[in-house]
Amino acid sequence: MQYLSKILILTLVYFGLSQITIQAAEMKEPLHPEWSFQGPLGKFERASLQRGYQVYTEVCSGCHSMELLSYRNLMEDGGPEFSEAQVKAMAAAFEVKGAPDEYGDVVMRPAILSDKFVSPYENEQQGRAANGGAYPPDLSVMVKARHGGADYVYSLLLGYEDAPEGMVLDDGVYYNIYAKGQKIAMPQLLSADAVEYSDGTEATPEQMARDVTMFLTWTAEPKLEARKRIGFKVITYLLILSFLLYFTNKQIWKESH
Amino acid sequence: MSDNYVPKSAVGKWFNERLPLLDLIYGHLMPYPTPKNLNYFWTFGGILTFCLVTQIITGLVLAMHYVADADLAFASVEHIMRDVNYGWLLRYIHANGASLFFMAVYIHMARSMFYGSYKEPRELIWIIGVFIFLLMIATAFMGYVLPWGQMSFWGATVITNLFSAIPIVGESVTNWLWGGYAVGSPLLTRFFTLHYLMPFLIFALVILHVWALHVPGNNNPEGIDVVKGSQDTVPFHPHYVVKDLFALVVFLIIFAGFVFFVPNLLGHTDNYIQANPLQTPEHIVPEWYFLPFYAILRAVPDKLGGVILMVSAIAILAFLPWLDTSKVRSAKYRPLYKQFVWLFFANTIFLGYLGAQVADGLFLIMGRIATVYYFAHFIVILPLLGYIEKTKPLPKSLSEPVLTKEEKEMLASGATT
């Protein structure tokens, strides 16, 4: 009988392994760059988040919405931490629908801190019409909504190559080694100097992909820094408490037996 | 259980004379005689109570901010994550809490199976436990639907569609459940209502579970009866209060590890995509704790058959006290059962693994074999073992197996001289 259970465990391990290879064949393993937000005490790089916001605004936001974020989030702790004056100015560059005036007409007004990020399209239909039928998804929680997370998003942004010979791609479909089936409806946008960084950093595709992925990780998990900071304290506290309880317990049971 | 509780204050005395509530609680928590040899597998009762209370408290606050509407639910959960003070913490505790609740309940059930805790005179404790487990499944499933992500929506679609397998009235029943002709807002609001209600039903059953437990008292690793108040028992407080607390804190370290450092590890990435009725996810998989039952469901090519088998897989647990014909409780003294119960655990984990795979080819065949074995354990192996197994001799008291051979000889010689 003992053999039987061992055999069962072995089969389990075997199929676990075979499954990994199946997945690997379907999708290419993404790149694994070092991220500052990894690890138990990880944090975002403030400058990278700020550059990432620039990449998002100047490149991605033409097609992708960010509906869950408000401009005020950009100045909050644990984020890009722009100053209030900066964010007010950044928000004012966008126009949103104001409240109806005394005649019932809706007038446009500059966005303020409490406004949500302005979406590029009025609705999904408009987005599809502008992108050959494919709807660019909202990016607010994108990093958490994809297997592989930040690594996957980063890799995808850099995964554009010439399609192998003999592969025919439809109009509006691009070859990307990290995309599912190596096909994606998003064209390559991060070519060198696609943006001009205000802090003078050289805008290589790797740098831009890195910055914007960092930014998207923050938009998906804006409380990441607080979470890890509190978690570290909680676990330290619990470890000390468990240590004390262990010896209390030992003491109590000393006389029994 | 009124083991001489004396209120210290005048108010306490006044109250206790009129309503002996403190008396009752005191009796169950303080002098309650407990076998002295319980191992750490016996700490999961306390851990589970903690899980239930945590889920209720965090759930209560989450419900203050959540909006049960198909158009607003997803955004309201994100509102909790972003704008509610410590909302992210409450939600991550609640979501991971469900997973750890099931982890603990599976260990708790496995302990009961291994040491035969479900046997006479504790059958009713076990059966109440099975009902708690059933309610937990329903509660967890409905809770997973609430964030209205892709897996929420499609999980709800797959499971509610199972009701359409009922002959003749299936379609009507399904539409009645949905409150319409598809999964949408009406279903979401009723799931929210039930998800809020059920934990309180679980809580009521937990009280019955503990009450029923405190009549015969705890089973123990040796599986033999102990005489209350003898050398074999110790008062619950402080012995097990502190031991349970220590185990709880160790459990909390693991819990905190999930909540603070890998809060989304046990969830599915697709549930961060808002529900879209027009787009079916590639693989619809339930939460990890349902996977063994999901594998059983899919092992049958017929929908109705699959549903019957899946329900039976849980229902059969209620009959366990009578399917197991052996009088000996603990697997420690049942050499054959010990092997088979481990095999059963391995098989259930294997079913869970299969539940996460695409059900075709070899996976489907293995799923069928594992399903057959799951049921065979209950309706063939357990009834037979009681007759063919030669059990080891049971110790007369708890003190006996603790002693080494030399100590026993010493005791024996001491008794004669």
Image: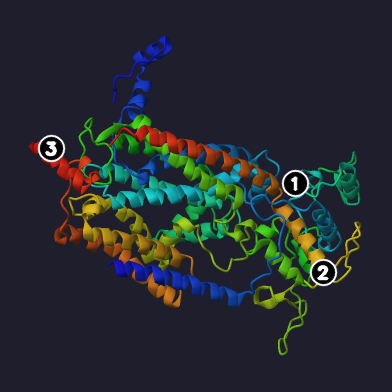
Callout 1: residue from which chain? Answer: A
Relative horizontal placement of residue B361, taking residue B35 as reference (left or right)? right
Give the Cα distance between marks 3 and 2.
85 Å
The residue positioned 15% from the left and 45% from the top of the image is B409
Residue A84 visible in the current orientation? yes
Chain for disc number 2 = A
Do labels 3 and 1 touch, CB within 8 Å? no
The mark found on residue B414 in the picture is 3
Q: Tell me the residue that label 1 is attached to.
A: A78
Q: Residue A205 bears which disc, if any?
A: 2
- Compared to residue A174, the image places residue B110 above or below, namely above
In front: B227, or B139? B227
Q: Quadrant of the N terminus of chain A?
A: bottom left
Residue A136, given in percent of the width and then of the height, sits at: 75, 65
Quadrant of image for the C terminus of chain A = top left
Q: For the residues marked 3 and 1, what is the alpha-carbon distance in whole angstroms?
A: 72 Å
Give the residue at x 75% y 58%. A214
Amino acid type for the residue under numbered disc 2: Pro
Report the number of discs.
Answer: 3
Q: For the residue marked with disc 3, what is the amino acid?
A: Gly
